[in-house]
Image (spheres, rainbow, N blue to C red):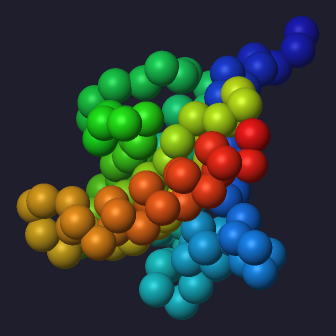
Amino acid sequence: MNPPAKRLPAAFYRNVAGHEPVREWLRSAALSDDDRRRIGEDIKTVEFGWPVGMPTCRPLGGGLWEVRTTIKDRIARVLFCVAEGHMVLLHGFIKKSQRTPDNDIRLARERQAQVEKRR
């Protein structure tokens, strides 16, 4: 029996210099192995279960979405858009307030515009 197929495979956004900011953030010292595992599990939930609603995934409008992960004493977010059948992971961060910071949303939207321009 074949394993279920991903409905929306994840792809890392890559900037013109070749950097993949979300992959780099996931590998950084800012996150523990357990944090990475939990974030990865939530991304996987979206990949296999798309469309997914709360509490794992929430729309931010304009084609921007967030994967919501609760990690030890903190909240992590990975912002993504959907392009060419993939969830493109645009920006990851630790949330420090109730509201998603405008700077984080702005950065994700700039990256989203670059992804859409490349199509």
Q: Quadrant of residue 103?
A: bottom left
Residue 71 showing in the rendered view: no
| Residue 67 in the image, given as x and y percentages of width and height | 41, 46
| Residue 49 in the image, given as x and y percentages of width and height | 55, 22
Q: Seen from this angle, which residue lies furthest left?
A: 98
Instruction: Give the residue displayed 77% in from the left and 20% down from the top.
Output: 5
Tell me: residue 9, above or below residue 6.
below
Name the quadrant of the C terminus.
top right
Instruction: Give the residue displayed 35% in from the left and 64% down from the top.
Output: 106
Instruction: Give the residue displayed 34% in from the left and 25% down from the top.
Output: 53
Closer-to-camera residue (90/77)? 90
Query: Is residue 43 left or right of 99 when viewed as pictured?
Result: right
Q: Seen from this angle, which residue lies furthest right?
A: 1
Tell me: residue 85, above or below residue 70.
above
Query: Is residue 98 left or right of 64 when viewed as pictured?
Result: left
| Residue 29 in the image, given as x and y percentages of width and height | 54, 89
Residue 68 showing in the rendered view: yes
Instruction: Give the residue displayed 62% in from the left and 56% down from the top.
Output: 114
Closer-to-camera residue (75/110)? 110
Q: Seen from this angle, which residue lies furthest top?
A: 1
Q: Seen from this angle, which residue lies furthest bottom?
A: 29
| Residue 30 in the image, given as x and y percentages of width and height | 46, 86
Tell me: residue 63, above or below residue 20.
above
